[in-house]
Image: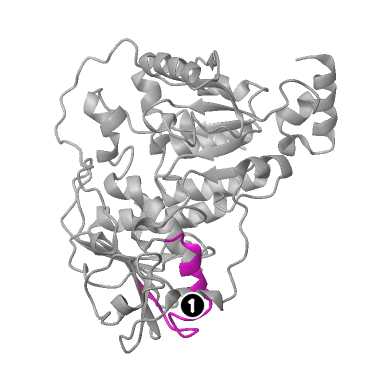
Amino acid sequence: MNTSRRNFLKAATAVGLFNIVPAHVLRGATAPSNQLTRALIGFGGIAGSYNHLNFKGSRLIGLCDPDETHVQNGLRRCEQAGWGKVKAYENFMKLLEDPDVDIVHICTPPHWHAVQSVMAARAGKDIWCEKPMTRTVGEGKRVMEYVKAKGRMFRLNTWFRFQDSFYGFGTPVKPIRQVVENNLVSTPGKPIRCVVGPGQGFSWKFFWSGRVNLAQQECPKTFDWDMWLGPAPWKPYNKDRAHGTFRGYWDYDSGGLGDMAQHYLDPVQYLLCKDDTSPVKIDYVGPKQHPEVVGRFDRITLTYADGTEVILDGDGTLRDEPFLRGDKASVYPVNYKKGPIPEWTENADAKGKTFQMVDANGKAMNVAKILKDLPEPAAQQTDFMDSVRTRKRFCLNEETGFRSSTMFNLAIVAERLGRSFEFDPVTLHAKDDEAAERFLYQSLREPWDNEFYKA
């Protein structure tokens, strides 16, 4: 570290600014390397996506992975993507020590997300974290509180609350929020029923299920299995636990819920105007779950204090239900073929372009015309690089992301319990239910538990 940089850091620390000054500022605006820099923690399949390896809004300078074959593949692909020869770090702790890294992309399996987010915040890095945000409510609570306390910028890597068409709806989620917050779906104070399942365009990917009674296998010499496990309970190596099939095991993820729920439910949380709260009751219908291997569910219902329900339809029995139903209107996907929409074919100005609505009497509503006359939702901060530069929080940050991850983490607890339980959205604990509490707040394997909770 050069003298001027060291002096600047000392001065910044003295006035309490160190946690809000990105490295590109410290290098100086006229330096050749004044672009924001980032590095990837983990280089499995998701790291090669547009939002990580191929993201062009900042300069990629390094990566790490406990599998040497992944490291070598990553270095090769970085060159192919035009980043030149980037640095390979010995492990993620070495990466976090590098003062030239502004932003870390956490592309590891979900059991690592919470620990690495906290350690990155402690190291003064801004954080772009893969979904799901965390595996448990307790982990999410710690990440939310710690990242906020350290003044770091945090982005969760799902985007449907602010861009792209929302699955089968032919539109971004913003206009759906528009009709909800302007009380066209439900009278103020009346609940809304939301169904998320195959009939509404959402697949729960039940093929993400692991295998029971795995035999121990010899671990490849290029793979640091203990580091890959990290905070998860120690288990003997089997290739089915790692890399492309880890989602099928509770220790590392939660099957289709872990894979897709934050994509599905974060926009649902936003459009229902529930960013500041969580469900109070969680009901489960489905088979008993294996203690290690993720299975399927039939139905999980998340109920809020005002009676609003979000129903995760796993068996398709609610296939013909609308996506949203209130006392005033119902909302359907754009290509919905069933249900009481007799006049829809005549609504040519909106057909095939946006979602469908019917009023309480089953009469089709002209969505395009309705939207023109409605106030729009408040603007969102949707540029994470701008968040890093200006310190203006990203719209899907550690707080909103925590609340949407809490939705499916509560569902997972009910799934593993095989029954209903109640939750306090203020204290963030189960109500008089020790078994539920053990799933909500799980311990981590040392030394990572200590790393996670230290100041």
Q: Is residue 152 left or right of residue 32?
A: left
Locate residue 240: give its quadrant.
Answer: top left
Pointer 1 residue: 369
Q: Is 375 left, or right, of 196 in this rendering?
A: right
Please tell me whether mark 1 sits on a helix, a strand or a loop. helix
In the displayed structure, 307 sits above or below 431; it is below
Foreground residue among 15 and 323: 323
- Residue 43 drawn at (x, y percent): 42, 25
Report the residue at 56% width, 49% height from top: 398
Q: Can I make out residue 450 in this image?
A: no
The image quadrant where one finds the C terminus is: top right
Left/right placement of residue 94 relative to residue 317 reads: right
**Residue drawn at x 38%, y 65% as measured from the top left:** 432
Name the residue nearer the viewer: 342 or 97.
342
Q: Residues within 10 Å of mark 1 (few under 14, many from 20)?
A: few
- Tell me which amino acid carries mark 1: Lys
Q: Position of residue 450 (x, y in %)?
A: 51, 33
Q: Which residues are magenta?
A: 171-194
